[in-house]
Amino acid sequence: MSSMLKLLAITVLLSSILEAGSASEKVEDFLKNNFSNNPSLESVNVRVINEVIVKQREEWTAYFVELDAVVKKDKRKVTQKMVWFSDGNVITKELYDIESSSNVGDLVSLPFKDEYYSKENLIYGDSNAKHKVVIFSDPLCPFCRSYVPEAINYMKKYPKKFAIYYYHFPLPSLHPAAVELVKAAVALELKGEKNVLLSLYKVEVDPREKSVDVILEKFNKTMNSNINKSDLLSKKVSQHIEHDLKVADLVMVRGTPTIFFDGDMDRTKNKYKEAK
């Protein structure tokens, strides 16, 4: 079926649902009915977790949706977050601006709520600083390796202006070595070592490396430390990383680096330079 035919089919289906109930309930009902038709899924549940008016397109609302289902074949539980757009009559997964050819999805994001800021993630600056900047990063992400140290070094000079919060977000499918590298960094910080983060971006290791021994050798050489495998298994290390990944999931972080500036996702990644 062509994309146009799919959109037309969606339009008819949603219009039939939009006769009663709140907008979010209509979206939930439509998506539940739609996904329930997938023969590989069972026990499908759909929940709108947030909704945001699209900037410059106020007739459209972005619905942040969480899907829970069970895979029939192996009874595996799956959870997926996604964004859908609706103007009350039509629902679509993607929305484009004709004049600019831009993806409207780039204009919406979940807010970084006050309860997500954690003192354990505050790496530089005063928590009462004028601006709060959040960084989700993988230390082996090529762009992160240049961007993150530069941004942090700039902002840390102004502790009353910027509170910098850092959240580990290793990407195991792309950089498997980052997972153990991040554990080693957290373990070293828990031992009382300061300024670990910026040095983390100087560790030279193959992103595809899977040998923990090799990763630790590279890490310890850079840090002049003695972190071992048992340190990586610490419950506190696991809790810290799990916390960071949980927050990333709550705000639907998908790649690195992802930056939030005063609670809003900064897709330019440069708002800190413009802050007065």
Image (tube, grey):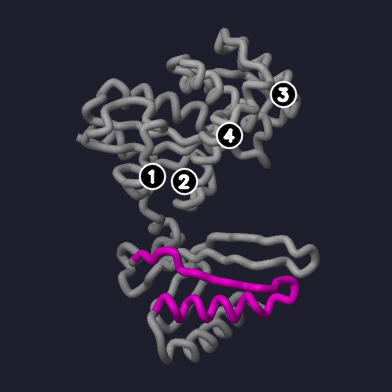
- Give the farthest residue toward the right: 73
- Disc 3 element: helix
- Disc 4 element: helix
Find disc 3 in the rendering and name its residue: 212
Give the mark toward the camera: 2 or 4.
Answer: 4
> In this rendering, is residue 109 above or below 125?
below
Q: Specify which label sits upstream in the sequence, 4 or 1.
A: 1
Give the mark toward the camera: 4 or 3.
Answer: 4
Q: Measuring from the top left, give residue 49's x and y in whole percent.
A: 44, 64
- Give the farthest residue toward the front: 235
Find disc 2 in the rendering and name its residue: 247
Q: Measuring from the top left, give residue 137's x and y in whole percent.
A: 50, 35
In the picture, which quadrant includes the N terminus? bottom right
Q: Specify which label sits upstream in the sequence, 1 or 3.
A: 1
Q: Specify which label sits upstream in the sequence, 2 or 3.
A: 3
Find disc 4 in the rendering and name its residue: 238
Range covered by the magenta-colored residues: 23-52
- Residue at the (50%, 73%) spot, across then down: 92
